[in-house]
Image (tube, rainbow, N blue to C red):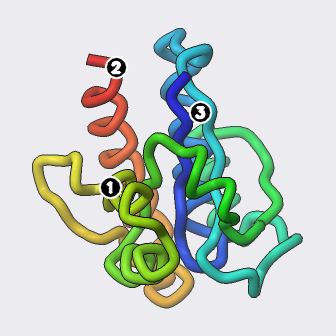
Amino acid sequence: MIKVTFVCLGNICRSPVAELVFKKLIRERGVEDMFSVTSCGTSGCEAGSSIYPPAAATLKRHGVAGSHTARKITRKDLEDSDYILVMDDDNMRDLKRVASESEQKKIYKLCSFTSRPRDVADPWYTRDFDRAYADILDGCTAFLEKVSG
């Protein structure tokens, strides 16, 4: 089983969107049994919160169902994950500060698997939830292609 953890800052916008989009993709391809998928934040500032309403509305518009409760990444997440997929350079830097050398080798930016590597801009600040969704879908699709062949 491939253990995938999506990570952003607060775990209420980008990483739960990525988690739910990826779950939908693997369900549609019939490869759910190959993966364990979760998401969390580098900060615990939103722990216990639901998906941010504009992010949830974006998922609904795209036919992506599911719910999520925000949480902060744990030592166990770092140890147990096969892939830790972050949304931007800030998330990467925050995790690499606390990850061991072997754990650092598991950390990738989500869109590094695409033909156009980039950060997923934080819609909390940009207010552009559709652009974040498009970047996340692109990253998740490219990542799934890489790991499932």
Q: Give the crowd class for mark 2: few <14, some 14-19, many >=20 residues within 10 Å.
A: few
The mark lying in front, picked from 3 and 1, is 1
Q: Give the crowd class for mark 3: few <14, some 14-19, many >=20 residues within 10 Å.
A: many
Q: Amino acid at mark 2?
A: Ser
Q: Amino acid at mark 1?
A: Lys
Q: Nearer the viewer, residue 43 or 17?
A: 43
- Please state, as top left, top right, bottom left or bottom right, where the C terminus lies in the image: top left
Residue at mark 3: 23
Q: Earlier in the sequence, mark 3 or mark 1?
A: 3
Q: Residue at x 46, y 53 (%)?
A: 84
Instruction: Say the numbered circle drawn on residue 131.
Output: none
From this view, report whether residue 34 is shown above or below residue 108.
above
The quadrant holding residue 96 is bottom left
The quadrant holding residue 56 is bottom right
From this view, report whether residue 135 is shown above or below residue 89.
above
* Left or right of residue 115: residue 93: right
- CB atoms of marks 2 and 3 within 8 Å: no
Horizontal and vertical percent for residue 33?
A: 61, 14
Residue at mark 2: 148
Horizontal and vertical percent for residue 46?
A: 77, 80
* Left or right of residue 7: residue 12: right
Residue at mark 1: 105
Q: Earlier in the sequence, mark 2 or mark 3?
A: 3
Q: How many labels were placed on the picture?
A: 3
Q: Is residue 64 visible?
A: yes
How far is mark 1 from mark 2, CA to CA? Answer: 19 Å
* Left or right of residue 9: residue 70: right
State the residue lying farthest toward the left.
115
Q: Secondary structure at mark 1?
A: loop
